[in-house]
């Protein structure tokens, strides 16, 4: 009887790990990489936008 319970506990832990923890880890990994990519693009995007605004101001003066 104890052996049957051990198998059930092992099966339950394996099911929890593969059905919940593993997908959560993959989701967090994907969100983290997306966030890092967007953060790095956002830094350059603001700089380029500032340069474009400056060029538009110069064009208005001329």
Image (cartoon, helix red, strand yellow):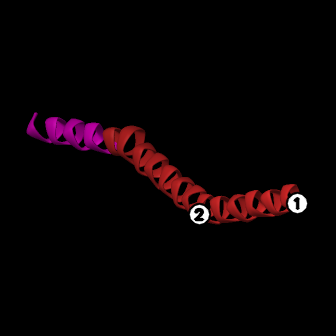
Q: Secondary structure at mark 1?
A: helix
Image quadrant in which you'd find residue 40: bottom right
The chief SS type of the magenta part is: helix
Q: Which residue is mark 2?
A: 43
Marked residue nearer the N-terminal end (2 or 1): 2
Location of residue 3 with respect to 44 vertically, above or below: above
Residue 3 percent location from the top left of the image: 14, 41
Badge 1: how crowded within 10 Å, few (<14), some, or many (20+)? few
Viewer-nearest residue: 41 or 32? 41
Residue 8 percent location from the top left of the image: 23, 35
Viewer-nearest residue: 61 or 59? 61
Residue interval drawn in magenta? 1-14
Image quadrant in which you'd find residue 13: top left
Image quadrant in which you'd find residue 39: bottom right
Location of residue 34 with respect to 43 vertically, above or below: above
Viewer-nearest residue: 4 or 8? 8
Q: Name the side, left or right, on which 46 lies relative to 56.
A: left
Q: Name the side, left or right, on which 18 lies relative to 11.
A: right
Q: Which residue is mark 1?
A: 59
Q: CA distance from mark 2 to mark 1?
A: 25 Å
Outermost residue, front side: 61
Residue 30 percent location from the top left of the image: 53, 52
- Residue at 41 percent across and 51 percent down: it is 25
2 vs 1, front mark: 1
Badge 2: how crowded within 10 Å, few (<14), some, or many (20+)? few
- Residue at 27 percent across and 36 percent down: it is 12
Outermost residue, left side: 2
Give yes or no for contact between labels 2 and 1 (Cβ–Cβ under 8 Å).
Answer: no
- Residue at 29 percent across and 40 percent down: it is 11
Residue 54 sits inside the magenta stretch? no
């Amino acid at each position: 009887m104890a052996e049957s319970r051990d198998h059930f506990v092992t099966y339950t832990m394996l099911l929890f790990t593969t059905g919940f923890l593993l997908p959560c880890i993959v989701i967090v990994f994907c969100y983290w990489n997306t966030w890092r990519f967007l953060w790095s693009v956002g830094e350059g995007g603001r700089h380029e936008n500032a340069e474009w605004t400056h060029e538009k101001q110069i064009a208005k003066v001329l």
